[in-house]
Image: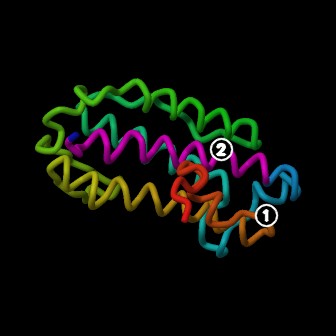
Amino acid sequence: MSFGIWEASVPVFVSSLTNMRDWLSKAAEERSEAELLEARLAPDMRPLPAQYQMASDSAKNALGRLTGTEAPSMPDIEKSFAELEDRCDRTIQYLKSFEPESLAGSDAREVVLKFPNGMGYRFRGAQYLAGFALPNFYFHVTTAYAILRNAGVSLGKPDFLQHLGPPNVIG
C-alpha cells in the first residue's frame, strides 16, 4: 500500500477530531462547562471554543484546498459543549466523504493562501499539507488539550492518542 495525501490527511484529521469530541465528555463530567468555555492558556490567546473551531476549519479547509473544492462554511457560533461536539461530528462527516481517489494528484496542486492583510503563501499540495495544514491543525488540537488539562480535566497522553486503541503488542 502506498502512503499518499489521503492517508496523511483524512484519517489523521478524523482521529484527532474524534479524540477532541471525546475530551468534551470527560470535561463535562469533571468541570464547569461555563468556566471551560472561557478558559484559555494566556490572556492574549483565544478560548477553548475557538481552538475547536480552528481545528475544524484547518481540517476541512485543507481538504477543500487539496481537492480544489469549497469546504462547507461553519460559522463560529458554538457556545456549548454540545455545539462543539456537533461541529466535530459535521467536520468528521465532511472529511469522511473523501475517497483516496479524490485526492489523486493533489500533492502537486497549487494552493494559494491569502490572509486579510493581503500577504500569504503559495504551495504545492504536499508542501501545504506537511508544512502548513497539519502543523496548524495540531497547534489548535494541542492547545485545546492543554487548556482542558490546565483547567484540571484529567486528560493524559492516552486521551490524546486514544485513536490507537489499547496496545496490540504483548511481551
Quarter of the figure with residue 31: bottom right
Instruction: Locate residue 28 relative to residue 55 in the image: left or right.
Output: right
Q: Residue shown at 76%/59% (left/top)?
A: 38
Span of residues in magenta = 2-26
- Report if residue 25 lies within the magenta region: yes
Q: CA distance from mark 1 to mark 2?
A: 14 Å
Instruction: Locate residue 1 relative to residue 75 in the image: left or right.
Output: left
Q: Position of residue 82 (x, y in %)?
A: 75, 37
Q: Amino acid at mark 2?
A: Arg
Residue furthest out toward the front? 171
Q: Residue shown at 62%/49% (left/top)?
A: 20
The residue at which mark 2 appears reads as 21
How crowded pointer 2 is (Cα within 10 Å; few <14, some 14-19, many 20+) is rated as: many
Nearest the camera: 80 or 168?
168
Q: Residue shown at 71%/36% (left/top)?
A: 83
Residue 86 in the image: above or below residue 145? above
Is disc 2 placed on a helix, strand or loop?
A: helix
Q: Position of residue 58 (x, y in %)?
A: 43, 48
The residue at which mark 1 appears reads as 153
